[in-house]
Image (cartoon, coloured by chain):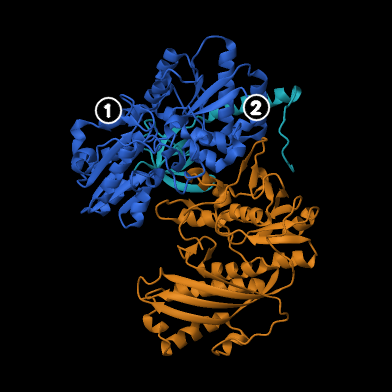
Chain colours: A orange, B blue, C cyan
């Protein structure tokens, strides 16, 4: 009979301590965490700090190319990285449903460890709760993160006409991958989530001195949400060319079948970058050296055609507005 | 092996067809696309922007959700509100507002309402819930009608005693006839629906062309198909007085259609003498119901006492009716984009993904000319 | 509602259900509306979980060839692209 997480594992007593030691400390091992104090005492190299938090309730917990744990790490790391910051420390809280499989939890924790290695970030504080059956849907994770700003001035307010827009990967993979798994839709595909930490490619852009104005990772609401938010925040127009936006064939297929647009589907490891005019090739050359950014593409420009709007240009000379995504499109995807 | 999807979205083909249409178009032609899916193709791919001023679109009533009168939406709500009941329907139906609420809002209040991707799931739901009444609220034009017929057949075979059908299937040719019958129709030609025609065959449109002398070109769904079909309409006018049904979608549509599907429909369903279309009024013989011998399956019979009968008209600011008849465009509506938006629709044209207002709202002013 | 998409048959089972593939996404559809036999490798038009009709690939090829010829004819004559859009081809 496979081992299960019990209410006693969250009780704060012996069972909790042994769960923490056998599982969390084993895989998240680092000097600060091992001290097992009430809180982590940290040193930062700068007082220019970014701080973020995220909760993860994705269903299903395991999907092609990832799981809730990988998502939690990449998601919070990317929030920090998008501010031009080196991700340093994370906290991690688990809310586990009574009866959850120990092996599944271990698989998730190992994924988290593997994902943290990509950016060098570590978990320095944590919490574990076990709730009675039905209290949470299997497992919920909350992560908070701290980073040190290494590139100042990154902001959604920076966009001006003639700036260039680049996307680092195919759009919509994560959202489409999760949607296909929904029981009522029953689609089978090899499509994987694009979930990944983006620190390394961003670090390379910063080190090469690329003139970046804004970064945003395209999560819920996808590319459309990012572009519309930028257009509104900077009071500009963003014009993108449909044939330059990379979309995986499977995502196209799912969109055709179900009547969605790939620009509304979530990503979890794909960023939209605004750079100064002329920096496009330099940016693409650097991004293309990273596996996770192989498909990076220069998709459009900032203009002043229609303030606060995003325009999609077709390859045959017509255009339409790319509306911000509305309503409950998908089940919980992050 | 041709790419059956992207191959029909080839930018070079589309640009070339646009040039040819501009070159050959000599007179004003108002084209009605009957099918809501075509409305979306036209708007989403921005086709009005690459067509000459002489070509104008009039949006037809090809959205099965849009033409449902409020009192029938209230039927769905009444049925869903019954105790021990599961109401299942396809797609957009759950968001359409009835006189007081919508299925979506009712679902949030705890009623068991299922939005399905395939009617096959209805059989599964009925089997899994033997002590509940499962009601399938069936909507759609001829494309979706045969699927309902298959489900009826399956229900009979499996001897399911807890499954009922509320049939709201409607037919295209009668609707087109009703539009043309109306003396002030401005329609010069039709883009025939793609997938309705797969089922019915294009023979169904021959009487209309005969009667009204309007060309009907059955068009595929892709932008190249629509552009080619418009070119064929232009050429029919240029060539002289002969008017005929043309089949651009030959790779999927034949003259006779899917005979097995037609047979299944005829086996289980019958034509209603009357059916009220929202905004248009009664169109005789334009809708279907279950045949009398299957009345035991018919939710309108079984649950008759719970179903409202009063005919309800739309809010006086809503001009969905005129839009459906092709007499107005969404921008002509005073509440379009203001009080009436996809998240709070006042009329069906805004809520359904096939409705003209929804298409205009989503794809914006850029995609439609003269807006 | 009219969402239909050409899909390739990759398997058929004994319950008259076919596995079809569209751009790398596979699903199960029923062949209950098909009167003619369906063979692996053929293309079907699918709507809400049902195969409605076969797609005549030859007809599709003919259509595409005609469009290609139109493009060639235009290239020999004039191509009228009045709309000035930003294209970074």
Q: Which residue is mark 2?
A: B18
- Please indicate whether residue B124 sits to the left or right of residue B366 in the image: left
Image quarter of residue A45: bottom right
User: Along the polypeptide, which appears first: circle 1 or circle 2?
Assistant: 2
Q: Nearer the viewer, residue B255 or A135?
A: A135
Q: Which mark is residue B292?
A: none
x and y, in percent, of residue A100 in the image: 40, 73
Q: Residue at x 35, y 76 (%)?
A: A132
**Mark 2 surroundings within 10 Å by alpha-carbon count, few (fewer than 14), some (14 through 19), many (20 or more):** many
Question: Regarding mark 2 in the picture, which secondary structure is present there?
Answer: helix
Measure the alpha-carbon separation of dots 1 and 2.
42 Å
Task: Name the chain letter of the residue that bears numbered label 2.
Answer: B
| B127 in relation to A26, above or below | above
- Please indicate whether residue A146 sits to the left or right of residue B82 in the image: right
Q: Which residue is mark 1?
A: B272
| A66 in relation to C55, above or below | below
x and y, in percent, of residue A68 in the image: 51, 67
| A292 in relation to B232, above or below | below
Image quarter of residue A5: bottom left
Quadrant including the N terminus of chain A: bottom left
x and y, in percent, of residue A204 in the image: 75, 66
Question: Regarding mark 1 in the picture, which secondary structure is present there?
Answer: loop
């Amino acid at each position: 009979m496979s081992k299960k997480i019990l209410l006693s594992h969250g009780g704060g007593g012996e069972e909790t301590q042994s769960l923490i030691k056998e599982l969390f400390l084993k895989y998240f091992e680092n000097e600060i965490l091992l001290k097992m104090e009430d809180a982590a005492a940290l040193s930062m190299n700068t007082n220019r700090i970014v701080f973020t938090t995220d909760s993860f309730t994705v269903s299903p917990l395991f999907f092609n190319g990832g799981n809730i744990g990988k998502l939690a790490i990449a998601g919070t790391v990317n929030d920090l990285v998008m501010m031009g910051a080196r991700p340093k420390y994370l906290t991690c809280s688990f809310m586990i449903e009574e009866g959850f499989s120990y092996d599944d939890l271990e698989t998730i924790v190992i994924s988290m460890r593997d994902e943290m290695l990509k950016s060098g970030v570590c978990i320095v504080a944590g919490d574990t709760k076990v709730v009675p059956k039905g209290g949470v849907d299997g497992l919920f994770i909350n992560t908070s993160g701290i980073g040190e700003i290494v590139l100042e001035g990154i902001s959604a307010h920076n966009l001006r006409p003639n700036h260039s827009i680049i996307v680092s990967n195919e759009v919509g993979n994560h959202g489409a991958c999760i949607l296909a798994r929904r029981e009522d839709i029953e689609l089978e595909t090899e499509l994987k989530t694009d979930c990944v930490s983006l620190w390394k490619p961003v670090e390379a852009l910063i080190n090469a001195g690329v003139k970046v104005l804004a970064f945003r990772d395209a999560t819920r609401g996808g590319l459309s949400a990012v572009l519309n938010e930028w257009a509104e925040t900077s009071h500009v127009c963003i014009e993108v060319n449909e044939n330059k936006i990379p979309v995986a064939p499977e995502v196209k297929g799912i969109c055709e079948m179900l009547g969605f647009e790939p620009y509304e589907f979530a990503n979890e490891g794909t960023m939209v970058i605004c750079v100064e005019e002329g920096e496009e090739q330099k940016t693409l050359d650097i991004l293309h050296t990273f596996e996770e950014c192989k498909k990076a593409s220069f998709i459009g420009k900032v203009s002043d055609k229609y303030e606060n709007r995003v325009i999609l240009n077709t390859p045959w000379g017509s255009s339409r507005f790319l509306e911000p995504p509305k309503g409950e499109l998908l089940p919980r995807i992050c | 092996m041709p790419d059956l999807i992207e191959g029909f979205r080839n930018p070079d083909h589309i640009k070339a067809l646009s040039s040819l249409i501009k070159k050959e178009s000599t007179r004003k032609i108002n084209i009605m696309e009957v099918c809501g899916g075509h409305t979306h193709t036209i708007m989403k791919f921005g086709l009005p922007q690459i067509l000459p001023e002489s070509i104008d679109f009039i949006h037809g009533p090809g959205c099965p959700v849009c033409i449902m009168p409020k009192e029938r939406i209230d039927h769905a709500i009444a049925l869903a509100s019954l105790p021990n009941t599961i109401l299942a329907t396809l797609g957009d139906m759950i968001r359409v507002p009835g006189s007081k609420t919508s299925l979506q809002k009712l679902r949030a209040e705890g009623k068991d309402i299922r939005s399905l991707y395939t009617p096959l799931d209805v059989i599964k739901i009925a089997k899994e819930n033997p002590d509940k009444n499962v009601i399938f609220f069936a909507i759609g034009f001829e494309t979706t009608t045969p699927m309902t017929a298959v489900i009826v057949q399956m229900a009979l075979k499996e001897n399911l005693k807890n499954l009922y059908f509320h049939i709201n299937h409607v037919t295209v040719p009668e609707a087109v006839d009703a539009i043309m019958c109306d003396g002030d129709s401005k329609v010069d030609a039709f883009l025939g629906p793609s997938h309705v025609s797969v089922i019915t065959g294009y023979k169904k449109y021959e009487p209309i062309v005969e009667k009204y002398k309007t060309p009907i070109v059955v068009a595929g769904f892709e932008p190249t198909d629509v552009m080619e079909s418009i070119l064929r309409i232009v050429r029919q006018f240029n060539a002289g007085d002969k008017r005929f049904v043309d089949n651009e979608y030959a790779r999927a549509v034949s003259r006779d259609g899917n005979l097995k599907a037609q047979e299944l429909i005829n086996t289980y369903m019958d034509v209603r003498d009357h059916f009220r279309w929202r905004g248009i009024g009664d169109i005789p013989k334009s809708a279907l119901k279950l045949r009398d011998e299957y009345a035991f399956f018919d939710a309108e019979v079984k649950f008759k006492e719970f179903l409202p009968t009063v005919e309800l008209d739309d809010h006086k600011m809503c001009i969905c009716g005129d839009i459906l008849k092709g007499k107005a465009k969404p921008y002509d509506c005073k509440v379009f984009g203001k009080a009436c938006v996809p998240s709070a629709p006042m009329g069906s044209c805004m809520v359904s993904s096939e409705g003209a207002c929804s298409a205009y709202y989503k794809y914006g002013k850029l995609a439609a000319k003269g807006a | 509602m009219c969402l239909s998409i050409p899909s390739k048959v990759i398997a058929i089972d004994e319950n008259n259900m076919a596995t079809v593939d569209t751009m790398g996404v596979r699903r199960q559809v029923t062949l209950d509306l098909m009167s003619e036999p369906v063979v692996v490798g053929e293309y079907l038009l699918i709507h809400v979980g049902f195969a409605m009709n076969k797609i005549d690939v030859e007809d599709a090829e003919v259509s595409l060839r005609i469009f290609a010829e139109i493009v060639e004819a235009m290239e020999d004559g004039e191509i009228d692209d009045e709309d000035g859009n930003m294209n970074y081809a």
